Image (cartoon, coloured by chain):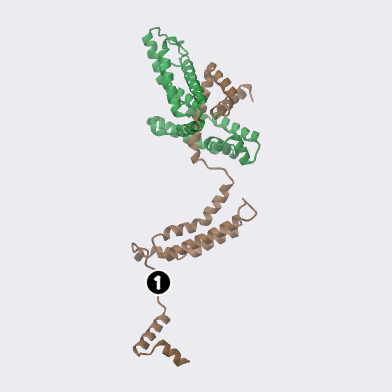
Chain colours: A green, B brown
Amino acid sequence: MEQNAENPSPGTPLVSPDPVTQRRTVEQACVSLAGEVGDFLQGMLRDRHLAEDAWQKTVVRAIESAQSVRLGTIRGWLFRIALNEARAILRERSRLPNSTELSEDVARGQRSGMDCRELPMDQQLIREELRVALRASLELLPVDQREVIRRRVYLEMSFAEIAADMNVPLGTVLTWMRRGVVKLREDRALQKLLQD
Amino acid sequence: MLMADQNAEQRMWQTSLYLLGELSPEECLRYEQQLELDESLCDELVLGARLLQATRAAFPDVSVPMLGVQRHDYASVAISSPVTLSSSASGISSISRKAAVFSAVAALGLLFAALATPVGFQQPSADVLQDAVALSDILGQWEPEIGRDADWEGEGEDRVTMPENPDWLITAVDLDAQSDESGVTTDDEDEAVF
């Protein structure tokens, strides 16, 4: 996780009654947790641009309410603000009539999620390392599990479509997907790279 | 499996379903309420989102485990010679290109005939494969010789390689020339015979 000695960590109580210092601490937390909260928002919203909007709103809201933060829980507090901002965007989005264009936006945002060109060089290297490690892990999965993950995640087919296409029951597809995803998540090398 | 492992696995799976948009609105709401209370679930969501992004990015390079792979491998063997011929034929002569196209079509014909058999996805017999490769090899044999001829370099497409004139043809032409000089036409000769 992105933490350093200067910035707050989950278990470190913050003793900063001074409003200026407290505000500065919140700002530092926003900087140090930007990657994590950004990925969290992108996971919720499935759109990079919406996630960026939500992150900006989160930072503004966090700085505005810096005085109300319970010291020592700043990380969880920031996640909760981000969660609320994301939910507000999701609610607003669900009210919009034209969902087709939004789906295209979502798809575009998801595909561009690993576009390394906008990242700093060290993060590009980490992402490239992650991609290589993930490729190796995917190759190690049983063929059925890998194929279901490929169709659902990369080709964006529904589970029902995959089941029909592969001529297997829906439950089997879900089981293959679940086993494959859990194996990837439990891969130690991947875990480390995902946390960096 | 331990209860804790089951719970951890269940959290991973729920998070994956949430990220993939597979949860119902009610399930989404419950999951988001959990996010509000459980910071470790937020971490799980971050890791899940990163994994999903990385998986999307990694898949173009991951081998595709499909039955069609066998057919693809087979096809690549069968057509490799014609493809080479076709590419080397470009910029040489129309005759060599025709030969290359013909050999490619013939090899593909054999290939499709083999694939159209009722055995479906099974590997075609070795005989059929050998026939396709042998045919393309035979038809392509003379192609590299043309390609190696230094005189062809940069000469354009219009020149055609002519075989060396056989002796009998040279003799016949000489005789014909002699007969022209003597003022006797071929027709006259024919008439003289009959």
Q: Which amino acid does label 1 sit on?
A: Met
Tally of marks? 1
Residue A136, position in %: x, y?
Answer: 51, 37
Find residue A30 and report its image quarter: top left
In the image, taking residue B88 as reference, residue B109 lies left or right, namely right
Residue A75 location (% of width, % of height): 46, 17
Q: Position of residue B85 (x, y in %)?
A: 45, 60
Q: For residue B101, say whether it is visible.
A: yes
| Location of residue A169 in the rendering, given as x and y in whole percent from the top left corner | 66, 36
Q: Quadrant of residue A61?
A: top left
Farthest-out residue, top: A17
| Secondary structure found at label 1 | loop
Task: Residue at 60%, 31% (x, y): give it.
Answer: A178
* Occupied quadrant, residue B23: top right
Q: Nearer the viewer, residue A177 or A95?
A: A95
Q: Read off the chain for label 1.
A: B
Whether residue A125 is situated above or below residue B42 in the rendered picture: below
Give the residue displayed 52% in from the left and 29% down from the top. A188
Q: Is residue B8 above or below residue A71?
A: below
The answer to which of A124 and A118 lies nearer the viewer is A118
B99 lies above or below A73: below
Please name whichever residue, A78 or B63, is drawn nearer the observer in this view of the structure.
A78
Q: Is residue A5 something one can see in this rendering?
A: no
Q: What residue did someone put label 1 on? A: B162
Quadrant containing the C terminus of chain A in the rendered view:
top left
Q: In this view, does B159 lie above or below B21?
A: below
